[in-house]
Image (cartoon, rainbow, N blue to C red):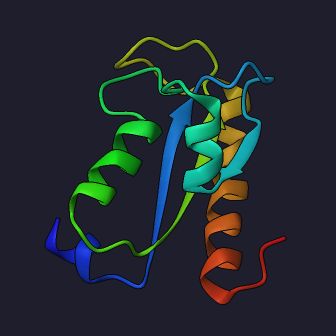
Amino acid sequence: MEEMQAAEHVIVVDAIDARKPPGALVVFTPEQVRELGADASPHGVGMLGIVKLLEALGRWPRVTLVGCQCGGSLEGEALSPEVAAAVTQAADTVERLLRGTAG
């Protein structure tokens, strides 16, 4: 938590259920997550919960949420082929965000 509070830019990567094809990546700002009005995570603390947690810290770093549409796997199962293929794309997206070149 302290690391997140001290950071200038927090990037969260998580599985989501955004009603998109498996493996689809979606980049959200906290405002966009709030506009959805629901937690799009298929498990535990989702993106909306993360946004609320960061707000509660009292210091608001720049936050970007990168979501990958889950493929219907149950917890503990291997990733679907579509989601596994999206891992490299998600890493590339995070790298672009860190460099400030993501569009």
Q: Nearer the viewer, residue 29 or 101?
A: 29
Q: Residue at x 73, y 18 (%)?
A: 19
Q: Nearer the viewer, residue 73 or 56?
A: 56
Q: In the image, residue 31 lies at what x, y percent?
A: 60, 52
Q: Is residue 100 above or below residue 72?
A: below
Q: In the image, residue 51 lies at what x, y percent?
A: 40, 50
* 22 displayed left or right of 50: right
* 60 displayed left or right of 63: left
Residue 36 appears in which quarter of the rendering?
A: top right
* 35 displayed left or right of 53: right
Q: Is residue 40 above or below residue 75?
A: below
Q: Residue at x 41, y 75 (%)?
A: 61
Q: Is residue 85 above or below residue 8?
A: above
Residue 59 appears in which quarter of the rendering?
A: bottom left
Tally of marks? 0
Q: Nearer the viewer, residue 2 or 43?
A: 2
Q: Residue at x 52, y 14 (%)?
A: 73
Q: Residue at x 42, y 17 (%)?
A: 77
Quarter of the figure that contains the N terminus: bottom left
Q: In the image, residue 90 lies at what x, y percent?
A: 66, 56
Q: In the image, residue 58 lies at what x, y percent?
A: 23, 68
Quarter of the figure that contains the C terminus: bottom right
In this view, which residue lies farthest toward the right? 103
